[in-house]
Image (cartoon, grey):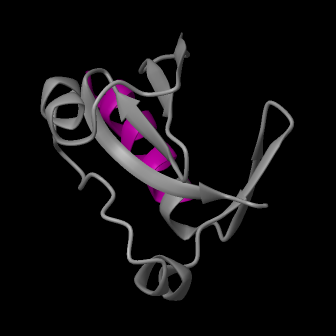
Amino acid sequence: MIKMNFISIFTVTILMLSTSITLAEESFTVVPEQIMTRNINTPVRGLTMDQVKKQLGQPLKIIAAVGEPPITRWIYKDFIVYFEHNLVLHSVFPDK
C-alpha cells in the first residue's frame, strides 16, 4: 500500500512539475498562463468521470486505462482530461 501511494504521488508530482510532456507521440504543454488566457473551463482535480460527463458531455474519444494506477484519457475538442481510476488528475491543452 505504501509503495503504491508513493508511486501515485511520484507520478502526480512529475506530471505537475513538467512543462512539456510527450505520451504516445502526443506532445502537449502545461503552462498556467496559457490556461488563464484561453477562457476554457477545464475539469478540476478530484471530479468523477460522471461529473465531468455531466459538465462537458461525451468526449470525442476515450483512451482506455493503462498502467497502475490506471490512467485514462478523455479527448475533448480543446483539451485532454487525465483520470486516475475515476477521478480527474489533470487537464492539459495539446500543442497545436
From the viewer's perspective, is 55 left or right of 69? Answer: left
Viewer-side residue, 84 vs 2:
84
Across and down, in percent, residue 91 comes to: 44, 52
**Range of magenta residues:** 1-14
Asked if residue 4 is positioned above or below residue 68 in the image, the reply reads: below
Residue 48: quarter of image:
top left
From the viewer's perspective, is 37 left or right of 30? Answer: left
Across and down, in percent, residue 33 comes to: 51, 88
**Hey, which residue is sitting farthest right in the picture?**
25
* Residue drawn at 29 percent across, 40 percent down: 88
Asked if residue 11 lies in the magenta stretch, the reply is yes
Q: In which quarter of the image is the C terminus?
A: bottom right
Asked if residue 48 is positioned above or below residue 26 in the image, the reply reads: above
Q: In which quarter of the image is the N terminus?
A: top left
Across and down, in percent, residue 71 comes to: 47, 25
From the viewer's perspective, is 91 left or right of 80? Answer: left
Residue 40: quarter of image:
bottom left
